[in-house]
Image (cartoon, helix red, strand yellow):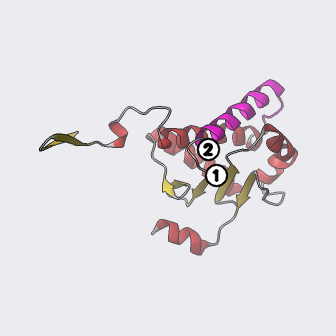
Amino acid sequence: MKLSLVPERVTASVDWRETPRSPGDTFYRAEVAMLETLRYIRLFAKEQAGDAATLENTREALCKAIHDYGALGIGSFTLLFDGVTTYVNGTLLRAPRSSHEAAEELGRLCGAAGAAELSMATDVSKDDLLALEPRLANILRGEALLPETRAFSLRALPERELARSRA
């Protein structure tokens, strides 16, 4: 942490990785939403969605995390995976290394379905997720078309858009 004294005020230049994060922080909420999305997608990618209680708890946790992110006045939660980094609504994911590793896993799971972008409306409901679930395992194996609904979508992006996101 570097301090510089300016007349009548003190300003600090702080590295975000060293700063304690609070639940009201935009980056914290984005990280939590991404981690809950991974937990949810992982159940279907590994075909472990058989336990109804686990699935219901994961579904509720995902909806809560997405709603909390939306409480910041943001209309959608979008993750873009370009193979190197993860972007949340166009901004680089700012999180600890373990969360970046989790984002890479989520990117690989989506990539297996041919998707580079995952998007959810911040008012996504459990019913929206329930409607998607019967096809989700097939989608993640690349055996079904990518879903594009108002509440949830997985999209393949042209290489040109991915190259622009890396620049």
Residue 65 highlighted magenta (yes or no): yes
**Quarter residue 117 falls in:** bottom right
**Start and end of the magenta stretch?**
48-70
Mark 1 and mark 2 in contact? Answer it, CB < 8 Å.
yes
Q: Is residue 130 above or below residue 152?
A: above
Return the disc, 1 or 2, that comes first in the chain's sequence: 2
Query: Residue at the spot x=18%, y=40% of the render?
Result: 9
Dominant secondary structure (helix, strand or loop) of the stretch shown in magenta? helix
Q: For mark 2, does the 10 Å Cα neighbourhood hold few (<14), some (14 to 19), or many (20 or more) residues? A: many
The amino acid type found where label 2 is placed reads: Gly
Disc ID at residue 51: none
For image coordinates 78% across by 57% down, the residue present is 142
- Location of mark 2 (residue): 70
Cα distance in 3D space between marks 1 and 2: 6 Å
Residue farthest top in this picture? 53
Q: Residue at x 58, y 57 (%)?
A: 81
Question: Where's the N terminus, which quadrant?
Answer: top left
Whether residue 133 can be seen here: yes
The answer to if 52 sits in the magenta stretch is yes
As drawn, is 154 to the left or to the right of 49? left
Which image quadrant is residue 41 in? top right
Q: Position of residue 59 (x, y in %)?
A: 74, 34
Q: In the image shown, does 59 or 127 lie closer to the viewer?
A: 127
Compared across the picture, whether 43 is left or right of 37 comes to right
Is the residue marked by circle 1 packed among few (<14), some (14-19), or many (20+) residues within 10 Å?
Answer: some
| Residue 56 picture location, percent across and down | 78, 29
Question: Which residue bears the numbered disc 1?
Answer: 75
